[in-house]
Amino acid sequence: MPLASIPSPSQGVWNLGPLPIRAYALCIVLGVIVAVWIGERRWRARGGEPGAITDLAVWAVPFGLVGGRLYHVITDWQLYFGSEAPNRPIDALFIWKGGLGIWGAIALGALGVWIACRRRGISFSAVADTLAPAIAVAQAIGRWGNYFNQELFGGPTTLPWGLEIEPGRPGTVPGIDTYHPTFLYESLWDLALAGLLVLAGRRFALRHGRLFSLYVAGYTLGRFWIEGMRVDPAHQILGLRLNQWTSVVIFVLAIAYFWLTRNKTGEEPLGAEPGADDGPTDGHADPAHPQDQADPDESGAEAEADAAGGGSGGGVPGGAADDGTTEGTGEGTGGGAAGSDPSGETFVAPDQGGSRR
């Protein structure tokens, strides 16, 4: 027996009347909320329109859930179909019971974001770079759902952080009580990756999807060795689990994209600026009349009056200057927007309405 260990939760489902509350689902929802919050802050800091990431999430989340479940069911079809399947075929639809493939979730989630970006006129690559650290944090939180379900753990270990697993679960060994907490390894890896992505983005100003490609490469690098520690049943090819081969392929593609786009430049549209389509409101400048610019009609009318009256000195009758000691020059002032102070320097009257930025 190890000197210390991590106990597993006694349950992962709580019943609120007839409604079951599952920890697995709560971890996923919490991860999405945190990712959207981080993404919104990063998007606004980049100059994007506030609320855009939240709108994109409306597309990304359902697409991602469907994609994640499809990948799980396709790669683990024997769990739901066949005479010896432990689950019924209808259980393939019960996403709240666990079973999401990150590869399918990211693939279809990205498709949803791409569609939404096209509709809003936003650069998909800019959004991907913005969300890269946020997605890593969401994965770190979501992995704790495996902890509550006591699933996807590693091989036996006597290390102080060994995870206690109930005997009889798939992958357990008779007489062994503690196993590698691979969920914790991946969660910590994802958090570290998120921090590195933020630092890399600030240090090198990576654009055009290059920061997202670093996220993909970093995640697959960690996933490869963590996947090799797991003992749950999985398809194997040449001694490696299917998810390890998937990690290798996607890692190579991510590095290739990062290299091929190293010299890519150009503007990435972030959408319309906030308030660009709003009409004038009380206390704000009318967009039709920029700050410090007079109305053409009013300017023309007062210019004619100035010409008829022989000019004015800063709008003061009789052509006298403000201090009453200097005679007018006979030059029009353009509607009183400009005048002269006692020093003789031209000044412009401030706009009383203010401006919106």
Image (cartoon, rainbow, N blue to C red):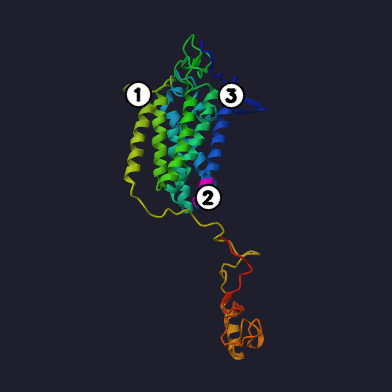
Give the vertical position of 82 relative to 25 (above or below): above
Whole-Å distance between the Cαs marked 2 and 1? 42 Å
Label of residue 240 in the image: 1
Q: CA distance from mark 2 to mark 3?
A: 37 Å
Q: Does the magenta portion include 43?
A: yes
Q: Which residue is mark 3?
A: 12
Which amino acid type corresponds to the residue marked 1 in the rendered image?
Answer: Leu
Instruction: Tell me the kind of residue under disc 3.
Output: Gly
Residue annotated with mark 2: 44
Which contiguous range is marked in magenta? 40-46
Residue shown at 50%/15% (left/top)? 178
At x 58%, y 87%, the residue is: 304
Cα gap from disc 3 to disc 1, whole angstroms: 31 Å
Viewer-side residue, 203 vs 47 = 203
Q: Quadrant of the C terminus?
A: bottom right
Mark in front: 2 vs 3: 2
Q: Earlier in the sequence, mark 2 or mark 1?
A: 2
Q: Residue 341 in the image: x percent, y percent?
A: 61, 78
User: Is residue 194 rendered magenta in the image?
Assistant: no
